Image (tube, rainbow, N blue to C red):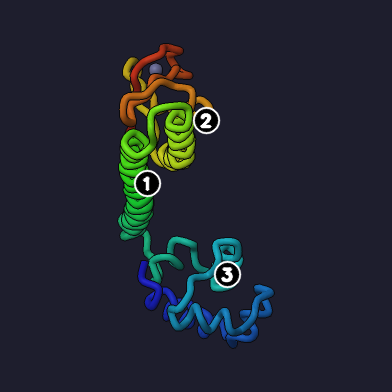
Amino acid sequence: MDQIKIGKFIAERRKSANLTQMQLAEKLNITDRAVSKWECGKTMPDSAIMLELCDVLKISVNELLSGEKINMENNNQKNEQLLLEMAKELERKNKTIWTSMWAIMTVSMIALLAGLLIAAFLIPEGIWQLVAVLGICVVFLIPCFYALKLEISVGAYKCKNCGHEIVPTYSEALWAMHRGTTRYLKCPVCEKRTWCKKVLKK
Ligand SMILES: [Zn+2]
């Protein structure tokens, strides 16, 4: 989305409605500084007042986000463009979360191995070595729980039987057996338990 273009469009529509920045701000119960920031392309109108703003400017949300008047001919095309942009943005976000999940797991795995090696070689065999090993394993669980939270926050798990994309709750995912990111889940549609592959895009 082109914020500069949207800003110019807001200014243009405001002027043709014969409103000053102050008057527009008053109609929307916000400050004129906020209006000025939109028009400079520094910020986007909050989604909470977008509808009201469009109402005052006599444009559609679609037109606001495109930064131009849309006629019937290019309306569908614009709609598709916007949807595509939103999908791409979601995809980017998901990828970032996915990458950080793997980064967390990789670092914790290395730390776990290093910790276990140190415990095995530096602590003499006996009760303290056992305590150290158990302690390290318990600490290792903390990043695991966190990584699982990240893992289920993006995408879904595809049912092998019917193809339904399952979004499990945290505890469902926690108690399900897993191989990597493939989880053994019960499908709410066909009610079969299968090894469900992780799919990022919904
Ligand atoms: Zn199913």
Query: Residue 199 versus residue 56: which sits nearer the camera?
Result: 199
Question: Which of the marked residues, 2 or 3, is nearer the chain's N terminus?
Answer: 3
Residue 92 position (above or below residue 28): above
In percent of the image, x 48 and y 40: which residue is there?
142
Is residue 25 toward the left or the right of residue 174 in the image? right
Q: Which residue is mark 3?
A: 53
Residue bearing mark 1: 104
Query: Residue at the spot x=36%, y=21% of the render?
Result: 159
What is the crowding at mark 1: few (fewer than 14 residues within 10 Å), some, or many (at least 20)?
Answer: some
- Say what secondary structure mark 1 lies in: helix
Q: Secondary structure at mark 3?
A: helix
Disc 2 beta carbon < 8 A from ligand 1? no
**Distance between the alpha carbons at the discs numbered 2 and 3:** 38 Å
Given contact means CB atoms under 8 Å apart, are the residues at marks 2 and 1 in contact?
Answer: no
Pinpoint residue 128: horizontal percent, then vertical percent.
47, 32
- Would you call the spot at circle 2 few (<14 residues within 10 Å), some (14-19), or many (20 or more)? few
**Residue located beneath label 2 in the image:** 169
Left/right of residue 73 with respect to residue 154 in the rendered view: left
Give residue 16's position: percent from left, percent from top.
51, 83
SS assignment at label 2: loop
Please, which residue is most extreme toward the top here? 192
Q: Quadrant of ligand 1?
A: top left
Amino acid on which the number 2 mark rests in the picture: Thr
Is residue 109 visible in the rendered image? The answer is no
The residue sitting at the front extreme is 124
Mark 3 Cα-neighbour bin, 10 Å: few <14, some 14–19, many ≥20: many
Location of residue 174 with respect to 38 vertically, above or below: above
When asked about the image quadrant of residue 186, the answer is: top left
Q: Earlier in the sequence, mark 3 or mark 1?
A: 3
